[in-house]
Amino acid sequence: MKKRRKIYQTWEFWVIVALAILVVSPRLKLPQFRLEFRKHDPKTVAPKKINNVNLAIDEIKSHTELGLLTSRKALFLRLTAPKGDGLVFSEEAANQAIDKMKFNWNKSATECAKRLLDGIINKRSELIKFLVDQYLFLPSEAEYALKHVKVDWTQKALQEAQRSVNQINYSKQMLYELLIDKERSGFTESEAHFAVNNINVNWSELALKSALKTKHENRDIEKELERQKFTSDQIDYALQHVDD
């Protein structure tokens, strides 16, 4: 009696398997998946440095505000940093391109300062810090911008003074000292005097708020208010009402 072969031993079985592979394999797209993985894997794609000055210039020109609102260092870092496709400009090409554009960095710093002052910045010290630390301008360029930017510093002092007393219970004298401190604010004495004399504030009420906070912390109220440089009248008012 002839022994019956198992199904996987028949040629018909392997024909069916081959046909199934031909039908299914286009849907798997395994080669494309592996290529995509290698393309985005930083370990397999080394950044290619482009040593083309004209191309670097085109890159600068493609962003209309580059050079106008940036420092030389920030622009250089932008050109030499890896792009999304893994391409970077060489340091030589970046430097030559920047030189050929002939930017006025003092003007750039001044324009940048103007925009900062139109937004979040009120203080001279804060402006210098932003220009140097955040925008990477040279200290000399930041000082030039501070000197030449058109701004009403008296109004800026008033705005900063109002913001400060809305957040902290400053006495008039402590607020004045804060405003003229070169490291913390940098306003002139006349600007600071105008600000503390024209903000919308009740100094006696601020003394009372400070007294209530001091009482909650179980500290000597009178000594603390004296340390904060409130006037005698303001301290008396606070002491009279702190237990109300």
Image (tube, rainbow, N blue to C red):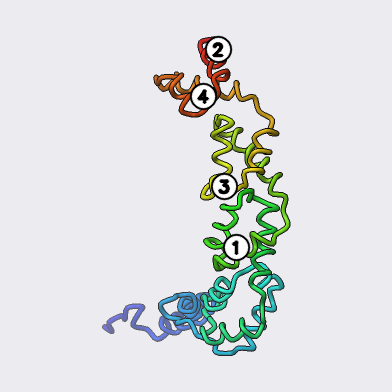
Mark 2–mark 4 Cα distance, whole angstroms, equals 12 Å
- Residue 107 vertical placement versus 155 (above, below): below
Q: Which residue is mark 3?
A: 185
Q: Nearer the viewer, residue 154 or 23?
A: 154
Residue at 68%, 51% in the rendered image: 119
Q: Look at the picture and state if 198 lies above or below 62.
A: above
Secondary-structure class at tag 4: helix
The tag earlier along the polypeptide, 3 or 4, is 3
Position of 28 compared to 145: left or right?
left
User: Would residue 149 be found to the left or right of residue 231 on screen?
Assistant: right
> Residue 95, which numbered label?
none
Label 1 and label 4: CA atoms lie apart by 38 Å
Q: Secondary structure at mark 2?
A: helix
Local crowd size for mark 1, using a 10 Å CA cut-off: few (<14), some (14–19), many (≥20): some
Q: Which residue is mark 1?
A: 143
Give yes or no for contact between labels 1 and 3 (Cβ–Cβ under 8 Å).
Answer: no
For marks 1 and 4, the one nearer the N-term is 1
Considering the image in quadrants, where does the C terminus appear? top right
Q: As displayed, is residue 214 above or below residue 108?
A: above
The amino acid on which the numbered mark 4 sits, given as a three-letter code, is Ser
Q: CA distance from mark 3 to mark 2?
A: 33 Å
Residue occupied by mark 2 = 241
Number of numbered callouts drawn: 4
Residue 95, x across and y down, in percent: 56, 83
Q: Which mark is in front, 1 or 4?
A: 1
